[in-house]
Image (tube, rainbow, N blue to C red):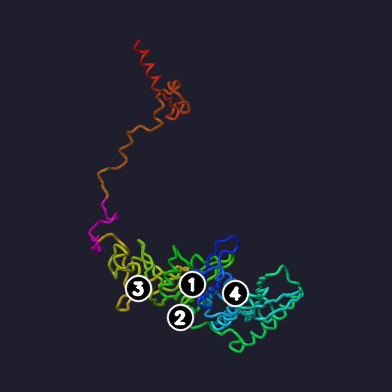
Amino acid sequence: MAMPKMNQMIDSITPETSKRYMHDYNMAPWANGETGRVGTPKRREIGHGALAERALFPVVPSQEKFAYTLRLVSEVLSSNGSTSMASVCASSLSLMDAGVPIVAPVAGIAMGLIFDQGKYTALTDILGAEDAFGDMDFKVAGTADAVTALQLDTKIEGIPSDVLAKALQQAKEARLKILGVMNAAINAPRATVNESAPKIVTFTIPLDKVGEVIGPKGKVINTIQQETGAEINVSDDGATGIITIGSPDNSKVEDAKARILAIVDPPTAELGAVYTGRVVNTAAFGAFVNILPGRDGLVHISKLGNGQRVARVEDVLNIGDEVQVRVDDIDDRGKVSLSLIGPDGEVIKGSAGGSSGDGERGPRPERSDRPRSNDRPRSNDRGGRNDRNDRPRSNDRNDRPRNDRNDRPRSNDRSTPSDAVSVSFEEEFDRDLRNDQ
């Protein structure tokens, strides 16, 4: 049992691209008294594993109800009958014992057939000799109410339908008897998964929140995995985001779930409250501190110097520093303004702001010795204005003739710089050449 990311990838001509339930069947040569090399699975092992997998897959819960990836391995130790059907029965028991909520237990039986002189005889739970000398190998698997898998091998040209019907009826009776024995051992899936299995929870979030949970380049989700120790898988079905969290420790799962839900619906900071946070970013104007999951606040550079001017934020705080801060203000848009708390538990005093200088400004000079504008003496050496009577007034200019202006162009006839004609180099050169001639 593992996380969904362990699903087996499939590259085939079928539309299926992955599967979450896998059944591996292994049978060493010595299990039936033979010698041989134990290596990669052969055709028989692959076929038997596929049959057992198909027999159990219909009762395996969907990923929405049970998010685990499941892999069963059948190790055959000895054989004198149908080991594939034995694998079905054993796998059903192991799934229930592991806490997998299967719909119903599944059992399997192998039916045989002897045909001689037009007479058919169906055999139940055939042995090795009956399989070798018989005319049919008919494997039937299913629950008490339905058949989940069938496989028929025959050595004769055809089998009448009534013979197959009789074989199916005998298989049902045998299957119910086997299920009774299995139910005596365990009749229902366990309430919880096995202690050695990871604890997995699955829940949905709004699709537009998936990016916030993952973060830039996976920064947010990787941080949650590192700090909680839980494995997190994020996917979507086109309408909602699907979060799957797994860990052997259930407390780690709950911790990771709480952090993700806080990102989806971040809590509101309280005005005046003190939080222990971590510096997540710095800028020229201050440092951003994460005080709650999904909630950051700004400590302005003017609040970092404890009464002195700070040239750079990095001179006081760096990314990753753990600090205590107090919430000073929360504006209408939810932006949080913070103050830094020193080691003594007191709020660090602010300054006038950031600066590139190294020290404080000196005191301003007193301005009391500077004369005010209304105290300045006005100059009296300009004299009065009565001595200007000897200057001619504008109406004494009537003796100037005005008719001589007729040959002057009107203002609207005068050329302006915008009316100037541009002369090319060639035209100017031709004009100078004519003047020289």
Near-viewer residue (271 or 275): 275
Note whether 190 is above or below 52 in the view shown.
Answer: below
**Of marks 2 and 4, which one's residue comes earlier in the chain?**
4
Q: Which mark is residue 249?
A: 2
Measure how far apart labels 4 and 1 are at the Cα level.
Answer: 24 Å
Q: What range is drawn magenta here? A: 358-377
Spot the residue most to the front: 117
> If the image is split into quadrants, where does the C terminus sit?
top left
Q: Nearer the viewer, mark 1 or mark 3?
A: 1
Horizontal side of 389 relative to 181 (left or right) equals left
Q: In which quarter of the image is residue 43?
A: bottom right
The residue wearing badge 1 is 36
Q: Where is residue 291 in the image (x, y as percent from the top left)?
A: 41, 73
Q: What element carries label 2?
A: loop
- Which amino acid, by three-letter code, is at mark 3? Glu
- Which amino acid, by three-letter code, is at mark 4? Ala
Measure how far apart labels 1 and 3 are at the Cα level.
Answer: 64 Å
- Which amino acid, by three-letter code, is at mark 1? Gly
User: What residue is rendered at 62% in x and 81% in y?
Assistant: 105
Q: Which mark is residue 52?
A: 4
Q: Is mark 3 on a helix, strand or loop?
A: strand
Q: Position of residue 49 (x, y in %)?
A: 57, 72
